[in-house]
Amino acid sequence: MNGPGRCPDCRKPVLWTRTLPGATTAGGKRLAVDPVPDAAGNTAVRRDGTTAWVSRRVTEQQPLMGYERLHKPHVATCPAQQPQLPLQATDTPGRPRQGALPEGVIRLDDRRRRRRP
Ligand SMILES: [Zn+2]
């Protein structure tokens, strides 16, 4: 799929693009970006010919060109993705988990301990 579509996770409108080869990526993957350009984004999007939408990461070496528009990758704003981020960060092995959770979040371990008689 290429062009306007919907996010399979949150059903919001997105723009499906094909990634161009970059400094660290081979390209050719599908990337959903938010359909409305955003100056705070890091992804340059343009139309390749008349049909395909392509995207690439904007870097210092490869700044935004006049024929491109700056978008945010949809994963950065997708509501279905947001809750997972802080929890994954606390599970890094070998790092102390204490204090890593946001305020008001109960640690599963603490809850289990409290349930025991
Ligand atoms: Zn989404």
Image (cartoon, grey):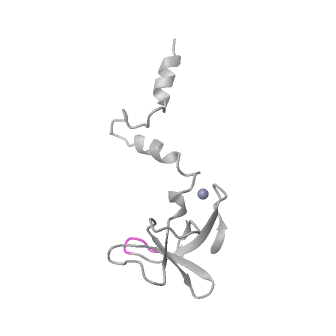
Residue drawn at 53 percent across, 57 percent down:
77
Q: Quadrant of the N terminus?
A: bottom right
Residue 109 location (% of width, % of height): 46, 27
Tally of numbered discs: 0
**Residue 106, visible in the rendered structure:** yes
Q: Is residue 32 above or below residue 107?
A: below
Q: Is residue 91 visible?
A: no
Query: Could you say which quadrant of the image residue 97 lies in?
Result: top left
Considering only vertical position in the picture, is 82 above or below 32?
A: above
Q: Position of residue 42 (x, y in %)?
A: 43, 68
Q: Residue at x 33, y 35 (%)?
A: 96
- Left or right placement of residue 114 versus residue 8 in this view: left
Dominant secondary structure (helix, strand or loop) of the stretch shown in magenta: loop
- Picture coordinates of residue 23, whole percent (x, y): 37, 74
Q: Which of the pair 115/55 is nearer the observer? A: 55
The outermost residue toward the bottom is 49
Q: Is residue 34 magenta?
A: no
Q: Which residue extends farthest front?
A: 39
Q: Which residues are magenta?
A: 23-27
